[in-house]
Image (cartoon, grey):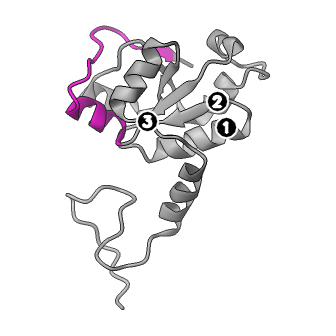
Amino acid sequence: MSADTSRDASEGFGRPVGDTVSSAVDLVVARAREGLRRLTPSQARAAQLRGALLVDTRTPAHREAQGDLPGAIVIDRTVLEWRLDPTSAWRIPEADARPRVVVLCRQGYSSSLAAASLRRVGVDATDVIGGVEAWVADGLPLHVGPADVRE
């Protein structure tokens, strides 16, 4: 079997190419998802309306290209655990209420890793299947105006 690792632009990150074995990162993402009850975009929106905290970890460039999510808090992935761990001195005020956290990224890969990491520090977290791309494809609302960015 050949070890072709080329990727066609139509194939998303994290998807095996042809009949090749999954990459190491694909396996890490799969393991992270084992402990998650991932949500569809519609389920995520419903959870948000019931009080879940929607957390957007996309880059500024991706947010600019795709739009922002209504009511979402934007937290950079590099500080996510510190901002959402209710025992952290660097937490955001919303973490004190220990809400369910729903993490979104562009396509739903890095958000799975983030949600699994949050669960390891005691946060009730999950992510969205397909990420913001699926949110947009499902016709769910986008936010107009400045995003709620937390440093």
| Marks 1/2: CA–CA distance | 6 Å
26 versus 77 height, above or below: below
Q: What residue is shown at x 35% (from left), y 75% (from top)?
A: 5
- Which residue in the protein does label 2 denote? 124
Q: Earlier in the sequence, mark 1 or mark 2?
A: 1
**Circle 3: is it few (<14), some (14-19), or many (20+) Cα within 10 Å?**
some
Foreground mark, 1 or 3? Answer: 3
- Which residue in the protein does label 3 denote? 39
Q: Hey, what amino acid is under mark 1?
A: Arg
Q: Is residue 34 magenta?
A: no
- Which residue in the protein does label 1 denote? 119
**Circle 1: is it few (<14), some (14-19), or many (20+) Cα within 10 Å?**
some
- In the rendered image, is residue 72 in sight? no
Q: Is residue 133 magenta?
A: yes
Q: Hey, what amino acid is under mark 2?
A: Asp
| Marks 3/2: CA–CA distance | 13 Å
Q: Which residues are magenta?
A: 130-149
